[in-house]
Image: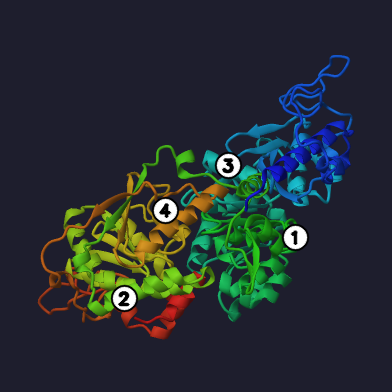
Amino acid sequence: MSCTKEEIERKRLAALQRRQSRMGQPNNPSHFSSPVKYNSVASSASPTVPYDQKSSVGPVKSFNSSGSTKFSPYAKPQKSGLNESNVPVTKPVSGTIYLISEDRFEVNPSEFCTPLINIFKTIPSKSYDYKSKLWNFSINDYQELMSRVGPLSPHVVLGPLPPYVLKVLQEQTVDPDSIDLSPVEATLKHKLMPFQEEGVRFGIARRGRCMIADDMGLGKTFQALAIASYYKHNWPLLIVTTSSMRETWQSKIHELLPSVPMMNIVTLTSGKDTQLVADRQTEVVIVSYKIAGMYTDLLKSKKFGVVIIDESHYLKSHKAQCTVALTGITKTASRVLLLSGTPALSRPAELFTQLSLIEPRLFGSYTDYGKRYCAGKQTNFGWDMSGQSNLAELQILLQRKFLIRRTKEQVLTTLEEKTRESVILDSTLLEFSKADHEELSQMAQKYNATKSSDKHAALITFFSESARVKIPAVCKYLRQLVPAESGKFLIFAHHRNMVEAICSTLDELGTHYICIVGSTPAATRAELVDKFQHTQSCRCAVLSVTAANSGITLTAANLVLFAELHWNPGILTQAESRAHRIGQQRGVCVRYLLAPRTCDDYMWPMLQGKLNVLNNVGLSGDTFEDTTTTHQESKNNLTRYLSPSSTKNKNDYIPGTNIRKYTIKTDQNKSTEKANVGHTSTGANIVKEQNIDDLDKTFFEDEEGDELLANLDL
């Protein structure tokens, strides 16, 4: 499109006329909100205007009769009596306000808005961050800022800080150092380490309603029992824990609180124990999560004054039966203590249920919490709370109101370091056929193409098939490791076929081991742990990553192997801490065995991403980014590393081990003598000969995702 010279000149003159009219108009709000109409004189003006003519238009300075400057294109606009913050804007501006520290908040507007910036500049505590290009202010100026921004509505609307944030900031807390611990039973009090005493004081300063989120192995049980002892006048005491930890809690109470008679401690396992629970003499009731959901009414009627919930991260779903049950039970309790080394296994949404047990009405609804801290968004299938938002504010609330967390590096200065290594398995030893390769490739493509809501189900199938492929390479690695490694070690796996293959390999190598999986009875676990810790000939512990990642101490080992990964990084870090905890005198090396072209290629970076989220909330200090990488040695043929199945009688061996029982040989001419210890049976055979249906129910009982896995039989 082209214009003639006359049209160009006419447009130029119209522009000059508009500018002249603006200079001559008074400075009023309507000038900013409505455009200036063309003046009819402009179109009929002379076609040429000399620049030396005394006019107020054009780029040359013009002077009035008094000699003062009337217009300058480079001069700053003169201030008028009108407050520019009240000038309406043409485009609506929204914004969010969130805490960045206990005493400062930040404003993040959706658009640049001059009136809003002008208000920011009037706040005394203003500060501009050149990196984020955002303004932040003192929390003391919050009300003043909101009152000044209010008149700009509806053109400018800032989402305020939630009422519960202001409430937490304004609460007066008790100084922990002023608390007298003399009510705590002396036997327990004298065993507390200084940092454990600090945790006890923190819990009492929070009126016995808090979460102790110390690193695994720092004595959360000691601290919880000390707080419960301080509030003994509020008993009876309810302890909710995993099935495998019930006996451990009972023995700890007997050891640390000797004033509580053993007859007054009841472990509720079935209906036959209900009368004992209802008995008025019963002071302590220990129950598993599953049983708590089954006998909710009985536990409510007991009206517990103090409730301890161990491994509280299992309550990540607010809809689960045990969560609903414990919500009702804790409503009448004066003190609620939550214990977890990993409060959130992967995302902030998992914290809501636990925080609601401590302060039921603080956050309001799950939706309100999710929109604020989980980047909640509504989809066709409901609310998606898988994200994260305002993590700095959430961390401040957690530390100020709810939890205390210390890491091993902070409090155990004498504890040796933990190092991580990733071992890339020999790809030539992976059990890959052409069909397997195509199948795994299809699974990888399906996983990548699946929507986020369905990715977990796709990953489980991929995960199961990868386990079968990895078995030969893992067995070879064990054959290389056992002769070269003189100390004890742990090896974690997830699938039944992987556990069996590892046990069979150790049988062939003549290496004594213990085996703990989901089907191992709780009473037997303590014996197996004691055998590993104190029997020199027992060199290895084969463990289920979901059934044995918490509640046991295996500090006799200083090497931890993971034959398989898990999609929750909290599960892995908990498993690592079976060896890296109080009592460990040496450095601990953790090795992850990764197989190329399997689900490991996708799970390893995913785990790091989830850890980064937890680090931002202050719930984890772990990272897999500094893991060193090595490669498995590749030599010899494949068949020598495959493990044949064992056919020995399981009754000849100590349950859960491949250690032969000491048999008595009777002879008329010889005295009784002990038989030599054999090496050819396997703890995995115990798993093989059990009822498969029962095994599926128990082997994967600890995680929601594992319930799906249990239905996959390879």
Residue sitting at 68 percent across and 55 percent down? 372
The amino acid marked with disc number 1 is Gly
Q: Earlier in the sequence, mark 4 or mark 3?
A: 3
* Front residue of 201 and 433: 433
Looking at the figure, which quarter contains the C terminus? bottom left
Residue hosting label 4: 577
Calculate the distance from the C-alpha at mark 2 to the C-alpha at mark 1: 46 Å
**557 left or right of 235 in image:** left
Q: Are marks 3 and 1 in contact (CB under 8 Å)?
A: no
Comparing marks 4 and 3, which lies closer to the viewer?
Answer: 4
Residue sitting at 46 percent across and 51 percent down? 217
* Front residue of 75 and 126: 75
Residue hosting label 2: 497
Q: Earlier in the sequence, mark 3 or mark 2?
A: 3
Calculate the distance from the C-alpha at mark 3 to the C-alpha at mark 1: 33 Å
The amino acid marked with disc number 2 is Asn
Comparing marks 3 and 1, which lies closer to the viewer?
Answer: 1
SS at mark 1?
loop
Label 1 Cα crowd, 10 Å radius (few <14 / some 14-19 / many 20+): few
SS at mark 4?
loop
Q: Is residue 64 above or below residue 121?
A: above
Residue 460 figure quarter? bottom left
The amino acid marked with disc number 3 is Glu
Residue sitting at 39 percent across and 47 percent down? 583
- Give coordinates of residue 22: x percent, y percent: 83, 35
Calculate the distance from the C-alpha at mark 1 to the C-alpha at mark 4: 35 Å
